[in-house]
Image: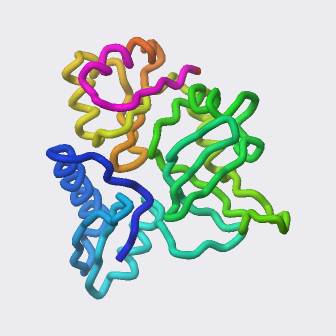
Amino acid sequence: MVVLATKVYVQGDARERALDALRSLVDNAVGDLDVEYTVGVRHDEFATVTLDGDDEVVARNLLREAYGEITPEFESGETYVGTLEGWDEEGFVLDAGERIRIPADELGLGQGTPIQIVERFGLVQHMPLRFVYGGETDESGADAHRLADAERDRLYEWTRGSGRVNVNSATRGEVRATVNRAGHARDIVTVERLGLLEQSVVCKDETDPPGLLSAIGDYLPAEIRCVIP
C-alpha cells in the first residue's frame, strides 16, 4: 500500500467525488501497467492506494513521484512531503504522518511573520509542501526541519507570475466548473493541481486575482487566497 501525501478531508457527496477523482488520477498514472489497485482513506485522512500485480513496484514509484508518500520513518537531511495543517507566529506545522514544525527562520520565504507569509504566497490549509527533515529536535541541538529549496523556488515563482487564486476543499474538476459557472473561463490560463483537494487557478496577465476570488468565492465552500505579483 502507498500512503499518498494528500488528504481526503471532506465529507458526504464531496468525499465521494474526491474518491472518484482519486481513482481517475491513479488510473491515469498506472492504468497501463500490469497492476490492480484500490483507493481508500487512512484513519488520519491521507489517501491510500493498495497495489497488486507484476508492475506493483513501478506503480508505487510513479505514485510516490507524482504525489509524495507518507513514510513511517525519516532520515535526517532527506526531503519529504507533508500537508500544511496550521501556522502561527512561531512557524508552520505540517502533517507528514507525524507533526513536523518548521520554525519561522527556516521557512526561507523572505521577511514577515509566518502568518504574513501565508497571505503573501496564498497558502491554503492541507496543501502539500516539501520539507527537509532535520532530525529529532530536542535538547541535543539537532538541526531544525526546513522547507525544501525546490518548494521555496516554486512559491517564489508564483509571485513572479501573472497571479493566482488558491483553493482547498475542491477537486480540480469542481474548481474548473466553478470558474466556468462564474463566467471567467477566458480569464484564466489553467487550474493547476496542488493536491487532491487543493488547486491553484493561474490567472492571465490582465486578470485581477482578488476580482476572480470575489467572483468564485460564493460558489465554493472553501478556503481561498490570492497570490498577487
Q: x, y percentage for residue 221? A: 28, 30
Which residue appears at 84% of the width and 68% of the height? 140
47 up-or-down from 118: above or below: below
Magenta highlight on residue 155: no
The reply, left or right, for residue 12 in relation to residue 134 is left
Which residue appears at 24% of the width and 27% of the height? 178
Quadrant position of the C terminus in the picture: top right
115 up-or-down from 47: above or below: above
48 up-or-down from 156: above or below: below
Which residue appears at 34% of the width and 45% of the height? 197
Q: Which segment did they paint magenta?
A: 212-228
92 up-or-down from 63: above or below: above
Q: x, y percentage for residue 153? A: 65, 42
Q: Find residue 130 and report its image quarter.
A: bottom right
List the single residue furthest toward the front: 139
Give 187 or 15, whichever is nearer the viewer: 15
